[in-house]
Image (cartoon, rainbow, N blue to C red):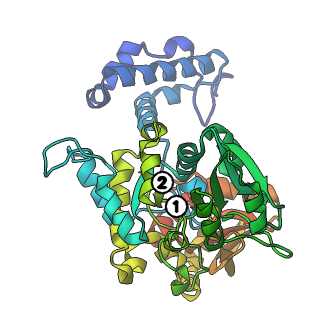
Amino acid sequence: MKTPDESVVHGSKARPQDLPALDKLLRDCAPLVAEHGHTLVAGEARVLLDGLRARAVVGQLTRLELEALAPMLAARVQARLAPSMRAVLNLSGTVIHTNLGRALLADAALQQVLALMGSPNNLEFDLDSGSRGDRDDLIEGLLCELTGAEAATVVNNNAAAVLLGIAALARGREAIVSRGELVEIGGAFRMPDVMSTAGATLVEVGTTNRTHSRDYEQAITPRTGLIVKVHTSNYQVQGFTAAVDEATLAPLAHAAGLPLMTDLGSGALVDLSKYGLPAEPLPQAMLAAGCDVVTFSGDKLLGGPQAGLIVGSREAVGRIRKFPMKRALRLSKLPFAALEATLRLYLRPERLVQDLPTLRLLTRNQAQIAALAQRLLPEVATAVAPRFGVEVVALQSQIGSGSLPVERLPSAGLAITAVDGRGRTLEALATALRGLPRPVVGRIHDDRLLLDLRCLEEPALLTSQLGLLKEMLA
């Protein structure tokens, strides 16, 4: 008969003195120490022993667990070394998802990063003269060719590009903006705050829904330094509205000796309507309309790394490049390499759909996605049965990251419902999916967990984990 401190399943309870000394545990795990070093393994061993000792004091530790100390320590070391930033499966239905890293880099960009980051490179070295170079020289010609600009520079994101542009062109002076364009983007980045931080005085003109050219003209004074246009890419005002386009504003600004700057935000470099997608304003068109400076993002519709691209006239971009803040905001070598490789893909526009992941995912055919959903249905249904039901459904994807907020892309995927009808049961499944080695991110809507398959190009990344998911749900 088992004594009171024993269990038929788990065996007898362990006492604190039954735990090995730290040195003995490390000797027993010598191969682990040899692989990872004494410092890391000993640190994790101390934490492990402390935790087990606390459980032993209150009678919650069994002798059987003491036999697994070596694998427990190995698991702790592996967990400690595992990166916090991990690859996930984006089945949320948002293609350019800000919280999931935005645009996926093209193979050419990945190869360029690997080739240059593991080797010295000519980031700021002129190979022709053998003297110090300017990193902007590596990419300026390419940006000018693609956009028609006279000059170009890049910084670490588009928020920085806007901040730098206003600071360089209007610091200590007034900057005029339509009240309907005083936007806030993610992270409470508000245009009025940007103006203040840049050292410019904001002058609002017009109303939330209607602004006319006369509003800008009447606001110009000797203190004015800049007119700013902001593309409201993350929301849309409809109905009784009026706005002044860049082609109308440019002559007005230039007649007063003022530069015109426009922020496009999302930053498409090609006409998306050619691919069956809603059109976005292009830097090329803004420059042709007379803008002196155009800013846009590298990691949204352009499909590259996080970067803020600044293109425009030689005089305006020159002022921006020389402004002291520029050095603090400059792009580092890793995204610089990825951006150059991404931009070079645009030299072959006929191949963009194949070569640029962002455009490839945005243009996937609904019928193709639905066919994939049908193929995956039996395996997913088996993995989540009997607690959940699964069906193929038509869905509406969105572009994401503030791009074309009201537009939707016809898509398809799997809808999973809880048999017991409880929301927390569905939440538990969503948590289990996020707990897989390759976390799966869907979305819960109308009491269903939706897995939009638009961004799933390698189904094996999902199906290979379904066995583990079934075990987790058992």
Q: Secondary structure at mark 1?
A: loop
Identity of the amino acid at label 1? Asp
Q: Position of residue 245 (x, y in %)?
A: 67, 71
Q: Which residue is mark 2?
A: 316
Question: In which quadrant will I find the N terminus?
Answer: top right
Q: Nearer the viewer, residue 31 or 341?
A: 341
415 relative position to 240: left or right? left
Identity of the amino acid at label 2? Ala
Q: Position of residue 133 (x, y in %)?
A: 24, 45
Q: Is residue 328 above or below residue 342?
A: above
How would you rate the neighbour count of disc 2 (Cα within 10 Å): few for under 14, some for 14-19, many for 20 or more?
Answer: many
393 relative position to 346: left or right? right
Residue 165: image tag: none
Q: Are circles 1 and 2 on residues that touch, CB within 8 Å? A: yes
Q: Does residue 94 appear anywhere in the picture? A: no
Q: Position of residue 292 (x, y in %)?
A: 52, 61
Q: Nearer the viewer, residue 233 or 356?
A: 233
How would you rate the neighbour count of disc 1 (Cα within 10 Å): few for under 14, some for 14-19, many for 20 or more?
Answer: many
Q: Quadrant of residue 148?
A: bottom left
Residue 292: image tag: 1
Q: Position of residue 53 (x, y in %)?
A: 56, 17
Q: Does residue 162 appear anywhere in the picture? A: yes
Q: Earlier in the sequence, mark 1 or mark 2?
A: 1
Residue beneath the point at 36% across and 13% down: 23
392 relative position to 302: left or right? right
Question: In which quadrant will I find the C terminus?
Answer: bottom right
Residue beneath the point at 65% across and 64% down: 231
Tell me the CA gap for discs 1 and 2: 6 Å
Q: Nearer the viewer, residue 263 or 394?
A: 263
Q: Quadrant of residue 419?
A: bottom right
Q: Is residue 458 above or below residue 33?
A: below
